[in-house]
Every structure is written in structure tokens, then in C-alpha cells.
Amino acid sequence: MLKTQTDAFLDRPPSPLFIPSKSGVDVATQILEGELFDFDIEVKPILEVLVGKTVEQALLEVMEEEELSNLRAQQRRFKELRNTELVETQRLEEQERRHREEKERRMKQQAEVLRKERETGEKISARAFAQSYLADLVPSVFGSLNENGYFYDPVERDVETYFMPWLLERVEGELSQSMISRTVLDAIIRDVVKKRFEVYHKLEEAARLAVEQEAAAKAAEERKKAEEIAAKAAEEAKAEAGDEREGGAEGDGGETADKPDEESVAGEDGGSERAPTADTPGETEQKDPEPADDADAEQE
């Protein structure tokens, strides 16, 4: 496989400077020393500018150094003030902590004193209650024994032991019989209501079916009327088509005497015209059921 490598494009060499050709005669002018430029006079403004800028820069640097020294002094004073405030804050926090601890200690002492006073009062009240209770111990013992039934009336005890349970049992039996009779009566009423509901439902179904049958009969009757109307319209169309064909045949018979060639053409034209008239009743028959469908839709 062969390849070809082309050389790179070389830059165009620069065009030589155009130098017009000399014309005329060369002349010269003699300038003596000090006529065009005096160094002492010309250098004075430049020296003034340099000296002024140097002095100004020196003053700016001195002012910056003084400002920096002032900033450092202000920072030092600020740090001293901050450290003083920090020490004061720590002192106040420590003082607040001591006050809080002292307050909590005093509150605990006061709570302890109150607890001891409450316990002392409870002990005193318990002692007084015990003395009063022990003073009335015998009457209270007899009263509690009497209330608990250790000292009872024989008649009252007999009534509570034998008569009341028997009475409660009889009342419970009467209530159970009443409950059973009510349950049976509710079941009978439920059966009667259910049967009546079924009868009413059947009557409603029969009425609905009768209404539907009547509506269907009306729809069939209207559909039949629509079909009769369509049939009459088809017969009228057929009659009109027969009349048109008869009129066309008479016209063709009058022209056959003078133009025998045109008779065949007229016959073909008459056949072509009669073909769509023969189909006309079919189209009317296809279009006639639409009123019946409209009648059905109105009945529904």
C-alpha cells in the first residue's frame, strides 16, 4: 500500500520595506551645544515630581505605620477589656452558682423542717385519736358486733334466710315465662310481617309486568301503524312511477314516425330512467321503518 506525504506550506516571506528613491539635494543644519536642550533646566520639573512623589509615599507609609500602631493599641485595649469582662462574667457566674446552691440547701433544710413538723403533727393527732378510740372501745365493739349480725332477731333472720330466696326464685320464674311469651309473640309478628311483605312484593311485580305488557302492546300497535303508513307511501310511489313510464312511452311513440334511429336511443334512455324508478319503492321501504323506531323510542 503506497502513501504520499506532501510538504507543509511555507510562510510567505515578509515584504521588504518600501523606501522611495531620493530626489533633490541633501541639506544639513548646524546645531550648537545648548541651543535645543539644557539639562539643568529640563531636569528640574522631573526632579520636582520624583521628590514630591517620594515624599508623599514616605508620608503615606508613616501614616500607615501610625495607623497600624493605633490599631494594635486599640486591639490590645480591646483584649484587656474583654479579658476583664470575661473574668467579671466568671466571677458573677460563680457567685450565681454559690447563691443557687445556697438556695437549694436552704430549701432542702426548710423542706426537712416542714416534714418533721408534719410527722410530729401526725404523731400527735394519731395519739389523740388512739386515746379517743380506746375511750369508746367497749361501746364500739358491741355496736360493731350488733351491726355484723352477732346479736340478731330470730324472726328477721328466718325471713332473710328462707323467705326472701324463695320469693326471688318465684319472681325470676315469672319473669322468665314472660320473657319466653314475648319472644314467641315477636317471632309470630316477624313471620306475619315477612309474609305480608312477600305478598306486597308479588303484587308490585304483577303490576309492573302489566304496565310493561301494556307498554309493549302500545309500541307494537304504533309500529304496525307506521308500517301501514310506509306501505301506503310505497304504493303511491309505485303508482307515480307507472304514470311517468306511461307518459314517456307515449312521447317515444310520436317521435318514431320521423326518426326511426332515435327510437332505439329513446328506448335505452327510458330503460335507464325506469331502472331507478323500479328501485324507488325499495328505497322508500328501507327508509319507512325509521318512524316506527322513533315511535318505539318515544314509547320507551
Image (cartoon, helix red, strand yellow):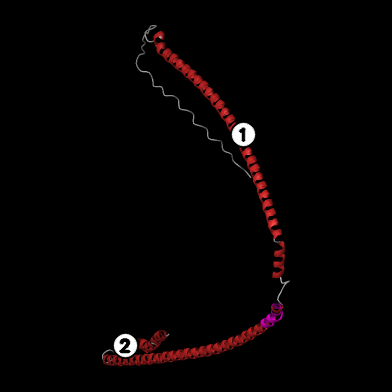
Residue in front for this viewpoint, 35 or 10:
35
Q: Is residue 165 magenta?
A: yes
Q: Quadrant of the N terminus?
A: top right
Where is residue 46? Give x, y as percent. 42, 14
Where is residue 285? Give x, y as percent. 39, 88
Q: Main secondary structure of the magenta part?
A: helix
Where is residue 95? Give x, y as percent. 60, 34
Q: Residue furthest right?
A: 150
Q: Is residue 246 left or right of residue 77?
A: left
Residue in front for this viewpoint, 159 or 97:
159
Where is residue 81? Give x, y as percent. 55, 27
CA–CA distance in space, label 1 to label 2: 136 Å
- Please report the residue visible at 65 percent of the width from the left and 40 percent of the height from the top: 105
Label 1 or label 2, whichever lies nearer to me, is: 1
Q: Is residue 206 left or right of residue 235?
A: right
Residue in front for this viewpoint, 151 or 245:
151
Q: Residue at label 2?
A: 266
Q: Which mark is residue 94?
A: 1
Q: In which quarter of the view is residue 273 placed?
A: bottom left
Where disc 1 sits, the SS reads helix
Q: Is residue 75 magenta?
A: no
Q: Is residue 168 left or right of residue 297?
A: right
User: Relative to 272, is 94 above or below?
Assistant: above
Q: Are marks 1 and 2 in contact (CB under 8 Å)?
A: no
User: Relative to 43, is 161 above or below?
Assistant: below
Amino acid under disc 1: Glu
Range of magenta residues: 156-168
Where disc 2 sits, the SS reads helix
Q: In which quarter of the view is residue 162 placed?
A: bottom right
Q: Residue furthest top?
A: 33
